[in-house]
Image (cartoon, rainbow, N blue to C red):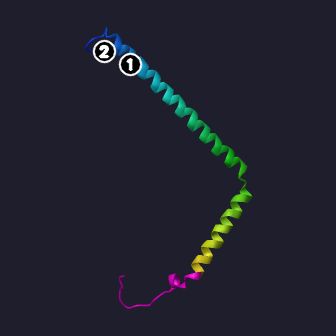
Amino acid sequence: MLEVDPDNKAAKNQLAITSHKIKQIHNREKQMYAGMFQKFAEIDAKVSDDDLCVFFSVVMFILVSVLISFPVLFTYRKTTSFQFC
């Protein structure tokens, strides 16, 4: 609109209002994401290597327990031809 009529005060005002609102939204998003990454950094700082080791040990124990309970997964069949399921 300003290209057609550069003296249009209503269009200039609306453009200024819209630009201001966009800046506000960007600032709000910056604050939101900055806080989120700061929280993740704090959590990472609190978690020690020992905690991760315990966690992965538990996960591996559960995984091995599940795999042992399903021996069918480890069954090997000797066949002379290909079998398709």
Magenta region = 69-85
Mark 2 Cα shell of 10 Å, populated few (<14), some (14-19), many (≥20): few
Q: Where is residue 83 in the image (x, y as percent from the top left)?
A: 36, 85
Q: Within the magenta stretch, is there residue 70?
A: yes
Q: Where is residue 75 in the image (x, y as percent from the top left)?
A: 50, 86
Q: Residue at x 50, y 26 (%)?
A: 24
Q: In whole angstroms, how far apart are the C-alphas of marks 1 and 2?
A: 9 Å
Q: What residue type is labelled 2?
A: Leu
Q: Give the mark count.
A: 2
In the displayed image of the protein, which residue is found farthest to the left?
Answer: 4
Mark 1 Cα shell of 10 Å, populated few (<14), some (14-19), many (≥20): few
**In the picture shown, does residue 55 fall above or below 11?**
below
**In the picture shown, does residue 59 fall above or below 80?**
above
Locate the N terminus by quadrant. Answer: top left
Position of 58 with respect to 16 (left or right) is right
**Residue, disc 2:** 2
Position of 13 with respect to 61 (left or right) is left
**In the picture shown, does residue 25 fall above or below 61?**
above
Q: Is mark 2 on a helix, strand or loop?
A: loop
Position of 56 with respect to 29 (left or right) is right
Query: Looking at the image, do the residues carrying marks 1 and 2 touch, with CB atoms under 8 Å apart?
Result: yes
Q: Within the magenta stretch, is there residue 77?
A: yes
Q: Which residue is drawn at 35% across and 13% down?
A: 10
| Quadrant housing residue 37 | top right
Q: Where is residue 36 in the image (x, y as percent from the top left)?
A: 60, 41
**In the picture shown, does residue 54 fall above or below 70?**
above
**Residue, disc 1:** 15
| Quadrant housing residue 22 | top left
Q: Which residue is drawn at 55% across and 82% down?
A: 70
